Amino acid sequence: MRTTGDTRARIVTAATELFRRQGYAASGMKQIVAAADAPYGSAYHFFPGGKSQLGEEVIRTSGAAYLELIAGLFPLPVPQGADMATVTADAFTAAARTLRELDFTDPCPLATIALEVAGTHESLRLATAEVFASWTDGLAAFYRAGGIAEPAAHETASSVIALLEGAFMLGRAARSTDPVLAASRAAAAVVRAARSEAGAGDA
Amino acid sequence: MRTTGDTRARIVTAATELFRRQGYAASGMKQIVAAADAPYGSAYHFFPGGKSQLGEEVIRTSGAAYLELIAGLFPLPVPQGADMATVTADAFTAAARTLRELDFTDPCPLATIALEVAGTHESLRLATAEVFASWTDGLAAFYRAGGIAEPAAHETASSVIALLEGAFMLGRAARSTDPVLAASRAAAAVVRAARSEAGAGDA
């Protein structure tokens, strides 16, 4: 039996999929509720603020889900004997697999909407900024635990996330996982450089 | 005196600005011709294929302009005594300045449209793929001239471009140049790692 909770969740899921596939501006409420198999009126019942309220919910919900994904891929405490550069490279290899499995739909639910709203919807821009910051904080904690002091830990985390987002962009355009696999080696180099500077600092 | 050539160019310029500020889907022909200070009918006179023809023109024109920018920042032959990692880091520092000067409008005219069209407009996706490939080829030629053999030269170029695109995304969301400045150091590390592996291969 479907409950109203189901309907609300289906609308959020459908919006997430449409925003990442075709963007925020191109996805109308009508298309979203149709994709969610929900009655049209339910969209404004659950989201009286309309598409921008739904957009904020999508950003926050996806952001929290991806933060858990990051925590899973970059476990704390850092497993004994684990090399931070290898863990990072492996996360990119997994991302390349995901990109292919999604048939080059954006594996990041935030990327398209983040670029679309940065200069046009201040409340949505802030929501994307907060989510990117939460991911950066989460990843920085992993690098810190592995011995990279601040501010290098945050800078490393920010660059690794930037590299992944950019590699998804190039990979989607080319319908190829090559940019993500190249970025896998690059990300390992970024982490190794930060680690070796941290080590030099210790000496 | 304004000629029809002016009108066409003004439409392309206005479309480029609107696509990078608010995205492709959100920019209607009506808004574009108004921003170009052109009569409405002129859009379909010059672009009988409508917005998707205009989109392709924007992608190719901006792509060619940015390829020249890359050639300027990464000169060939590599100037004597120039360090490839430093040249790369300097390009990111310049990009951070540009991001601030543009008040966090996208410095890359392709990024938003590339994500929007990747899964929805095959001809526009192909145009973005070709432009990204031309940038990667241009940058790879610089790294190759500096002693990084293929396929590492192309992989390095792809990762440096990905890093810049992703850093623009994070920087626009946060309205901060910090992600681009962090990526400057990361990009230098990526180039140094590729250079040192190339050097190890020579030995």
Image (cartoon, coloured by chain):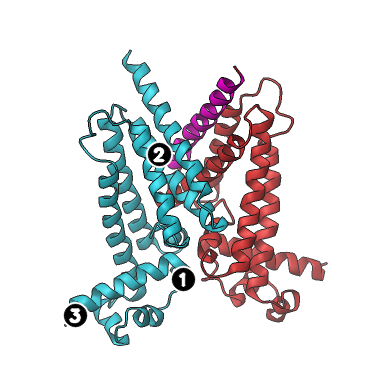
Chain colours: A red, B cyan
Q: Which mark is residue B89?
A: 2
Horizontal and vertical percent position of residue B55: 35, 68
Give the CA distance from mark 3 to mark 2.
Answer: 42 Å
Badge 3 sits on which subunit? B
Q: Which residue is mark 1?
A: B25
Report the magenta stretch's main SS: helix
Circle 1 — which element? Answer: loop
Q: Is residue B151 magenta?
A: no
In the rendered structure, which disc, 1 or 3, sits on the residue that comes first in sequence? 3
In the rendered structure, which disc, 1 or 2, sits on the residue that comes first in sequence? 1
**Which residue type does callout 1 highlight?**
Ala
Q: Which mark is residue B34?
A: none
Badge 1 sits on which subunit? B
Q: Which residue is mark 3?
A: B4
Horizontal and vertical percent position of residue B115: 46, 58
Give the CA distance from mark 1 to mark 2.
Answer: 34 Å
